[in-house]
Image (tube, grey):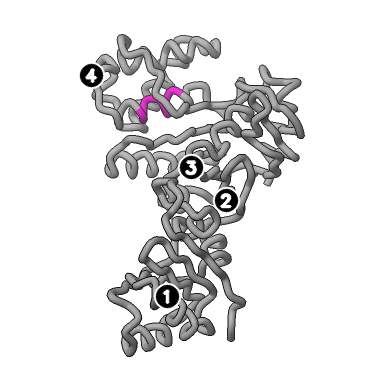
Amino acid sequence: MPVIVEAQNLQKNYNGFPAVAGIDFKIQKGQCFGILGPNGAGKTTVVVMIYCFHPVSGGKLTVFGKDVNNDPRAIKKRLGVVPQENNLDLELSVRENLLIYAGYYGIKKDVAEKRAKELLYFFGLSDKAGHEVDKISGGMKRRLTIARGLIHTPDLLILDEPTTGLDPQSRRLIWEHLRQLKKKGLTLILTTHYLEEATQLCDDLIIMDKGIILEEGKPADLIKKQVGAKIVEIDIEPTHKNSLIASVQNMISGYQLAGNTLYLFIPEDETAVMKILNTSNYADAYQIRPANLEDVFLKLTGRGLSYEEVSGYESSSFAKTS
């Protein structure tokens, strides 16, 4: 597939601070590409350079084959942007927010009205078209912000934390809309710190922390590579940790210790590990579950979803055994 965005040794410095410290990635046409990381990881800085809001400090960044520092106007015409914060005009109606934004792109009134009607229907906002934006819910405002980013039929839609602050039902509704847009061939760039969101939507992703890329690839491949198929979560006394790990070392691909919770990485079959846990006094309680991106993120960064350093964090990987 054609490459829509390409970064080579991309850098961005703020007063000498390396917010993005020399990264490489490619985004292909029709992908949903995720940029995953905590606040301060550099993901928003990456996307503001892609939509030509901040200049590149070093390296090279091209969008649609054009250099962002040399051809920002040509690039912006083909981009849709959904910023992290809703910046709708609260005193205007839902429909007026779309029509006025269409005017910025020189779209004729009859074309703009047709597109606005289609987008309001697509996002389930038709019955709110005449309402002031200040009177609709947070989830509806977010859907309207995405609709506004699509009014000029862009070739690439950039979504910066599109579901932050929304309830689970509203979040999943937006996920479904984004899936439908991808099925229509639209290329999406998604920054998020919701790991389930990245798993649900992204074809490929990069995991960033402190301005660098820690890992990249397809979500399922990253989980398999870094962790394995399953995780055993064990409540354990710290004094028992070393003995338990020694007894299962040949059956696991690695482990993490976060506080008093031990996470064992199971490459495929957990039967042998379960037998040891059930016949020993090591574990106070345990559960088994599928591995996910949260486990990958914890392994790579030593941080949980709160993005605070985990007390007593420890991680180790072993060579996979046959």
Label 3, on which residue? 38
Tell me the amino acid under the disc marked 2. Asp
Residue 34 position in % (x across, y down): 54, 44
Q: CA distance from mark 3 to mark 2?
A: 18 Å
Q: Main secondary structure of the magenta part?
A: helix
- Decide: few, some or many residues near mark 3? Use Cα within 10 Å; few <14, some 14-19, many ≥20: many
Residue 208 percent coordinates (x, y): 57, 45
Q: Are marks 1 and 3 in contact (CB under 8 Å)?
A: no
Range of residues picked out in magenta: 142-148
- Residue at (45, 16) in percent of width and height: 112
Q: Is residue 138 above or below residue 278?
A: above
Q: Nearer the viewer, residue 184 or 279?
A: 279
As drawn, the label of residue 204 is: 2
Element type where label 4 sits in the image: helix
Sequence-earlier tag: 2 or 4: 4
Question: The residue under label 1 is which amino acid type?
Answer: Lys
The tag earlier along the polypeptide, 4 or 1, is: 4
The residue wearing badge 4 is 135
